[in-house]
Amino acid sequence: MGKAKVNMVVRFLKGMQAEKVNVLGDKEACEDNELIQKVIEDIELFYEAELEG
């Protein structure tokens, strides 16, 4: 996956976190957002070499 696509996926997931807070509120979105954050971190770690290049 190219750098642009990785960045697009990460931006989408961060937007999803914000939308969950808007729809569910801070408390209700917390658990989901923690899981989404783990996915973001996993993607960034997996594609680290591409993101640096």
Image (tube, rainbow, N blue to C red):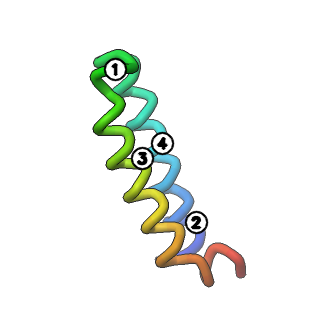
Separation of residues labelled 2 and 3 (CA atoms): 14 Å
Q: Is residue 47 left or right of residue 49?
A: left
- Asked if 15 appears above or below 50 in the picture, the reply is above
Mark 4 and mark 3 in contact (Cβ < 8 Å)? yes
Quadrant of residue 32 in the image? top left
* In this view, 46 is above or below 13: below
Check whether the beta carbons of the residues at disc 4 and disc 2 lie within 8 A of each other. no
Residue 12 placed where, x, y %?
44, 46
Q: Nearer the viewer, mark 1 or mark 2?
A: 1
In terms of sequence position, does the residue under pointer 2 or pointer 3 come before the other?
A: 2
- Provide residue 44's location: percent of width, then percent of height: 53, 67
Give, as a three-letter code, the residue at label 4: Lys
Which residue is identified by label 4?
14
Reading the image, the residue beneath label 2 is 4
Q: State the separation of the CA atoms marked 3 and 4.
A: 4 Å
Quarter occupied by residue 48: bottom right
| Residue position for label 1 | 27
Label 1 is placed on what type of residue? Lys
- Image position of 51 with respect to 37: above or below: below
Return the residue nearer the eye: 49 or 31: 31
Q: Which residue is mark 3?
A: 13
The type of residue carrying mark 2 is Ala
Q: Is residue 53 left or right of residue 28?
A: right
- Per the model, the C-alpha gap separating discs 4 and 1 is 17 Å
**28 relative to 8 in the view: left or right:** left
**For the residues carrying marks 4 and 2, which lies nearer the camera in this image?**
4
At 35% from the left and 31% from the top, the residue drawn is 30
